[in-house]
């Protein structure tokens, strides 16, 4: 008899939920062994047509085309998909449901079991992340209704950067205004930066508190961090995930006066500027495309707009790399992660080109090799190691969620 997925699940598994404005990612994972039992993605939640759930168990994929008017419906459908696999989530011995929460403000800087007071505080913080926190709360409420006896744990993207040095966290605006409206550098992708930096230290055979490293999380959203001895001292994202590197659709660093110019001269509203900065900026704004594979294909075909977009992207990346090398003083490793960072060899090569005198010597053959495991792509004698470390935010969330439940 073939073993079913239900037979393989050991007590202690964690269901990880990442709820977006119109999507919901999920993964059932063992935080101890890192075994993924099942995962999936519900898309176009709240859209009149085209909503679906892609559910993966091992190599078996099922696509369910179903109306998903809200997150509660999406969660219910996911629970039924698990049930069809013989998994009754309410009786599966789950340790926790780990929820990715984007913005914890200054209130949350470690994983926390979610109760009514926590929900109220997250709601109060929603103006800092209006596109992210509200749908996440809808996901929390929907899962808790269906799994009321399983602890819900919030893992915050901003937590890793909570205690940035004041000089790095503080914006040079009126201090009373900053205090009243919670304006400071919060940083994002913290779960990934923390996880990857720890993996990098282990790869190098050193303790986390011994290693100074620059982590470059390059996906559709992109961020950089300078980490000294396991603690971040700077990061590129700020009050919101808009600041910093050029991203898929976000502008990154930009002269603040451009918003005033667009309002006064272009007659644009705050919402118009927000849309340009967040939805139609970055690579998409420069060349109409935010898929890096397509951009590289267009560059090979001689497309000037794609080439300019790529050059701007790399220029900004090198800007942060240089700044963080100075911030840290001694750099032991430069670490690439996330979709672009893990897969775009050209980006890695161009970002590090000509830095041999600064201690970075890339091995061109290692750089173009494809692998799903952590690897070194610098030469063996390069003073600064260059690594590619796959991120695994879901596993990190599961491990943190399990730890807070088991120790509380």
Image (spheres, helix red, strand yellow):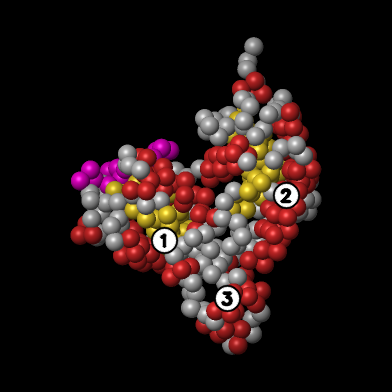
Q: Give the CA separation, mark 3 to mark 1.
A: 21 Å
Q: Seen in the image, is 80 located left or right of residue 391?
A: right
Residue 264 can be seen in this image: yes
Q: Residue 185 placed where, x, y %? A: 51, 67
Q: Give the CA separation, mark 2 to mark 3.
A: 29 Å
Residue 27 position by quadrant? top right
How would you classify the magenta stretch by its main secondary structure? Answer: loop
Between residue 72 and residue 212, name the one nearer to us.
212
Residue 57 position by quadrant? top right
Magenta part of the protein: which range?
365-381
Task: Identify the residue at horizontal 74%, vertical 43% (top origin).
Answer: 143
Q: Residue 69 placed where, x, y %? A: 79, 50
Judging by the rendered image, the residue that carries numbered circle 1 is 233
Q: Residue 188 placed where, x, y %? A: 53, 58
Residue 378 forms part of the magenta stretch: yes
Q: Residue 115 carries which label?
A: 2
Q: Seen in the image, is 137 located left or right of residue 362?
A: right
Q: Residue 124 placed where, x, y %? A: 70, 64
Q: Seen in the image, is 102 located left or right of residue 282?
A: right
Task: Report the number of discs.
Answer: 3
Element at badge 2?
Answer: loop
Between residue 112 and residue 147, name the one nearer to us.
112
Q: In which quarter of the image is the C terminus?
A: top right
Q: Residue 128 carries which label?
A: none
Residue 71 forms part of the magenta stretch: no
Q: Residue 178 carries which label?
A: 3
The first of marks 3 and 1 along the sequence is 3
How many residues crowd mark 1 within 10 Å: few (<14), some (14–19), many (20+)?
A: many
The first of marks 2 and 3 along the sequence is 2
């Amino acid at each position: 008899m073939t073993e079913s997925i239900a037979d393989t699940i050991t007590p202690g598994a964690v269901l990880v939920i990442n709820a977006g404005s119109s999507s919901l990612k999920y993964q059932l994972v063992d935080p101890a062994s890192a075994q993924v039992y099942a995962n999936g993605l519900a898309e176009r939640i709240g859209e009149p047509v085209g909503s679906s759930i892609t559910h993966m168990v091992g190599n078996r994929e099922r696509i369910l085309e179903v109306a998903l008017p809200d997150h509660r419906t999406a969660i219910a459908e996911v629970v039924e998909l698990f049930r069809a696999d013989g998994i009754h989530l309410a009786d599966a011995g789950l340790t926790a449901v780990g929820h990715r929460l984007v913005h914890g403000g200054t209130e949350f800087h470690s994983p926390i079991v979610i109760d009514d007071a926590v929900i109220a505080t997250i709601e109060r913080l929603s103006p800092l992340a209006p596109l992210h926190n509200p749908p996440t709360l809808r996901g929390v409420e929907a899962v808790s209704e269906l799994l009321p006896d399983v602890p819900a744990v919030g893992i915050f993207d901003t937590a890793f950067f909570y205690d940035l040095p004041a000089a790095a966290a503080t914006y040079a605006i009126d201090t009373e205004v900053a205090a009243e409206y919670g304006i400071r550098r919060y940083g994002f992708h913290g779960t990934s930066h923390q996880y990857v930096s720890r993996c990098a230290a282990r790869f190098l055979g050193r303790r986390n508190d011994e290693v100074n490293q620059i982590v470059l999380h390059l996906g559709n959203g992109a961020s950089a961090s300078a980490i000294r001895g396991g603690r971040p001292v700077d990061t590129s994202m700020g009050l919101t995930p808009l600041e910093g590197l050029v991203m898929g659709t976000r502008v990154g660093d930009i002269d603040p006066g451009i918003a005033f110019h667009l309002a006064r001269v272009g007659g644009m509203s705050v919402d118009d500027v927000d849309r340009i900065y967040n939805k139609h900026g970055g690579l998409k704004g420069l060349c109409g495309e935010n898929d890096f594979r397509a951009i590289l294909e267009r560059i090979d075909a001689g497309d000037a707009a794609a080439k300019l977009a790529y050059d701007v992207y790399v220029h900004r990346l090198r800007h942060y790399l240089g700044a963080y090398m100075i911030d840290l003083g001694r750099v032991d490793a430069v670490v690439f992660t996330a979709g672009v960072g893990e897969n775009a060899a050209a980006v890695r090569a161009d970002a590090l080109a000509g830095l041999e005198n600064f201690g970075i010597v890339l091995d061109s053959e290692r750089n173009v090799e494809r692998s799903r495991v952590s690897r070194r792509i610098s030469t063996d004698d390069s003073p600064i190691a260059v690594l590619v470390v796959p991120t695994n935010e879901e596993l990190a969330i599961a491990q943190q969620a399990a730890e807070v439940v088991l120790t509380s």
